Amino acid sequence: MNNYAVIFDMDGVIAHTNPYHSEAFKQFFDNYKVPYTEQEFEDHMYGKHNDYIMRHFFRRELTGSEIKRLAEEKEALFREIYAGHIMPIVGLPEFLSALKAEGFRIGVATSAPRANLDFIIDGLSLRSLMDTALSSEDVHIHKPNPEVYLKSARKLGVAPGDCVVFEDSFSGVSAGINAGAKVVGVLTSHTKDELPPCQYYIHDYLDIDVNRIKQLLAHTDA
């Protein structure tokens, strides 16, 4: 299956980090006296890039250097909070190993910063299973723009239509669809009805296997 690839988002897809991102944002916003609601987190935090998040919640013009400083502060807080809880979504390591054994190319394509990607991928000892790993620093336009998935497919040497993307957010699923990939919705952060239509849905990696990936790529009914 060397002409096919499986590409994973990270937050909510490789590890169930979103509750810890929420806690980090709450502490961060409280420190800056920035108001927020749980509904705003649902609408304007999950799956979004820090540039968008900071501009939305601070509700004022922010310079590029301000956004960079604020984002680095928040992400350092996230890593501090999450450090004692890092673990993969159930079944992921075994699923990755099975994909690798079948010859699939494997990539990570996240809107998170490189520091978070390295922290999680290396913390879970998954680096050896990944052929590519792209972070926010590797793209110019963030999800739902398909750039990160198009670039990931290109680096993997695979056509976008021969990729299966695993995503958990509205913007992420949209990016996978916009890239022309098959998309599996990971229901860690949202319900099926809250995501754009996917080819398949899972709650964890016990819900899927390599044969299902082959069926998706063969355009058979899943």
Image (cartoon, grey):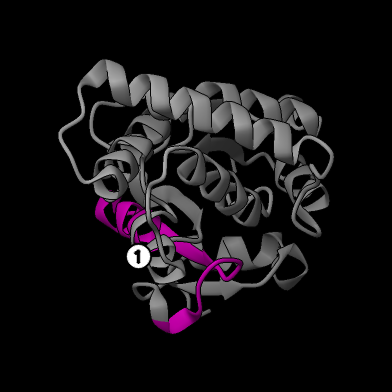
- Name the quarter where the N terminus is drawn: top right
- In magenta stretch: residue 178: yes
The location of residue 160, given as percent across then percent down, is: 35, 45
Whether residue 9 is visible to the viewer of this picture, yes or no, is no
The location of residue 220, given as percent across then percent down, is: 47, 75
Whether residue 91 is visible to the viewer of this picture, yes or no, is yes
Is 20 located above or below residue 73 in the figure?
Answer: below
Is 222 located above or below residue 11 in the figure?
Answer: below
Q: Nearer the viewer, residue 62 or 90?
A: 62
Is 191 located above or below residue 71 in the figure?
Answer: below
Q: Which residues are magenta?
A: 170-193
Q: Is residue 140 left or right of residue 167?
A: left
Q: Is residue 190 left or right of residue 53?
A: right
Q: Is residue 65 left or right of residue 21?
A: left
Disc 1 marks a residue whose amino acid type is Asp
Quadrant for residue 178, please give it.
Answer: bottom left
Residue appearing at x 69%, y 49% in the figure: 15
The location of residue 191, given as percent across then percent down, is: 50, 79
Graded by Cα atoms within 10 Å as few (under 14), some (14 to 19) or many (20 or more), the crowding at tag 1 reads few
Q: Nearer the viewer, residue 194 or 74?
A: 74
Residue appearing at x 62%, y 72% in the figure: 202
Residue at the extreme left: 61
- In magenta stretch: residue 46: no
Residue appearing at x 52%, y 74% in the figure: 200
Query: Which residue bears the numbered disc 1?
Result: 43
